[in-house]
Amino acid sequence: MLDYNEFQILVDVPTQNPELNFKGIATGLASVILNSKPQFAMAIYGEWGSGKTTLMNAIRNHLDENSVDDAKQKKARTGIVAVDFSAWRYEKEEHLIVPLLDTIREALVMKAMEWEAEAKAKTAKAKKFKALGNVAKETAKTVGAVIASVLAGFSFKLGISDALSMSYDANKALSTAARFGKNKTNEQPANGNINSHESFSKRLVDENLFQSLYHACFKALANSFQQFQKVVKENLDIDEARIVIFVDDLDRCLPRATLQVLESMKLFFDLQGFVFVTGLDRRVVERSIEACYSLNAESDSIPDVDSDAPPLVSGRDYLKKIFQVPYSLRPVNRTAIGNLLHSFSETLQLPQIQKDDINTRIHRHIKYLFPQESNGTPNQSGINPREVKRYINAYTIQMKIDGNLNADSVLALNTLYFRRDCEKIYDALRADRKIFSENLKNYLADKSNPSPLEIYQMTSVDIPEDIAEYLEMANGGGALLDEYELERYLELGESLTSSAGGRFLDLLPAYHRLRGTLRKAVAATDANDLRNELDNARKQLQDLSSFEGERGVAVSDLENWVGAYSSFNSSLRRLESEIASSVNATGQEATDIATRIESLRESVSEELKTKLDAVYQELRNRQREYAVS
């Protein structure tokens, strides 16, 4: 038995040394940045957890001068200023243009320090690198002046004290900055007392003072970065200087913040030397854009995808105008799962005992974590690296909590839970525990006979072909079906896949028990069996009703769904009454009652199925909503 004390969870950080062909992709996209006119935006499209940040980091690393040995390539990379902007981190800022500008300013300061250090270390090129350091610092000052002006403008609009003076001083700084590099005079706008609107108005006629905040900002940035370009090109003898801004986590922002970042990026599109590399989930961002342009623009909520109302602005068309270079990141192919696991093992510096477990036992199970096509070929939907980490972490924590569990059974249960096309199997296990395990084994022994599954309203189609193979493996999914203490595994697994609290964890098993009982009632052919199952169902309904007094977030939302059963409770009582009448009936009377029972049972069966499916789906959706991500 393994000692799981040394095991670590796989933290959700981008892989630094990807082994999934990201190196080749990064090389190609970095070449686009290095050899194209630096005045465009690149989009890295990918779903949640598909590796966008990892790829962006790989591109950034390839732009570093230390990534190459060739002198010419190294020189081209020396003129690159890389900027990292995490949109999600700053989404609570009222005006996202401010933190975006500030990260650019900070990157310029860091580059200035780097060039100044080179000036001290290299005597032959000291003068050149000193000039580079100076121009980077001056450009950073201009960006700082722009930030001050923007903040002053916002303060002025809000009526903040001294905003008038702030606005004048900021525009005065911008007017000077806008002439940076244009001439050698240091003319300043006229000074004077500006503590009143009258005095401030007189200053507005100063020919050197910009009247428009946005024009002043753009002019200052344009002239400053033009001078930056000139000095860098002259001293490094390169074609272009490049400021490459990596924007990440845009799809995590609320709709209005998402649009703010995209609108802020537009400010730089007419400035020479700027390249944006942005990672985003296309579907999420498109919906965010459409939400902001919807009639309900005051809300941060995203419209219902099924809404019939057409968006005022197409998110897809908007993104096409923003990004000239799109690249869609494909999910990892199942055939590359070994490389992915090896990448996790090495880059996350896991202990050897855990590496061995990942590359042997977990690898054996994880092959079945994502569906296959019916012919056994890899599914084109591919593998999500973040989902793989969640799967491994769930297993690791379960084994740390209870090291006496069968590791194969834990992994098998997690596989069924994580696979969306195995919901019916997982739910049946929860509802009937050992009984379903036996029925499933009976079906697997003779797949031509699906009758053991019929009581669960399942057919052979509900058991994916690759999962049937998996459940027949003794050291795979088959371990779960032979598990004696299945309840123990289910309870621990549920604790790690839901964050809603104990009462919610009790509610779903209670619901599944009721669901299994009602299915048996619907399928019963003997009157006494039917009556017994209905009696059990009524008791379980009473158990579920006890949850209505709970006032937790999850349970309060579920009260109405639990209450949905009361509408057919009267039908259950009528059916039971008919059954009771049939016990003492004889002859034609018994035949008539039997006909009425069958008719009523069919109608109740249909009603049960409809309501059961609706409540089940609501509960399932809520459970997934609370799933730990």
Image (spheres, helix red, strand yellow):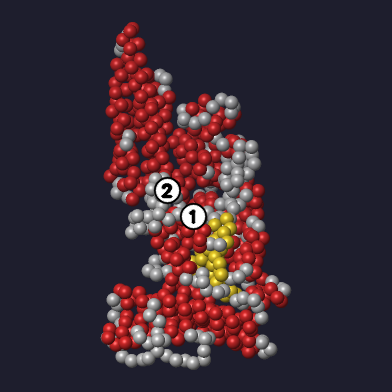
Image coordinates of residue 96 in percent, x first then y, are: 42, 69
- Does 603 appear above or below 131? above
Q: Is residue 354 left or right of residue 534?
A: right
Residue mark closest to the camera, 2 vs 1 = 1
- Does 8 appear above or below 226? above
The circle on residue 316 is 1
- Does 439 appear above or below 207? above
Residue type at mark 2 is Val
Q: Which residue is mark 2?
A: 305
Residue type at mark 1 is Arg
Residue 370 shows in the view: yes
Work out which residue is located at the far top of the displayed protein and give it.
587
Q: Is residue 57 left or right of residue 434?
A: right
Q: Earlier in the sequence, mark 2 or mark 1?
A: 2
For image coordinates 67% across by 71% down, the residue present is 67
For image coordinates 35% across by 15% down, the residue present is 595
> In front here: 196 or 561?
196
> In front here: 581 or 78?
78
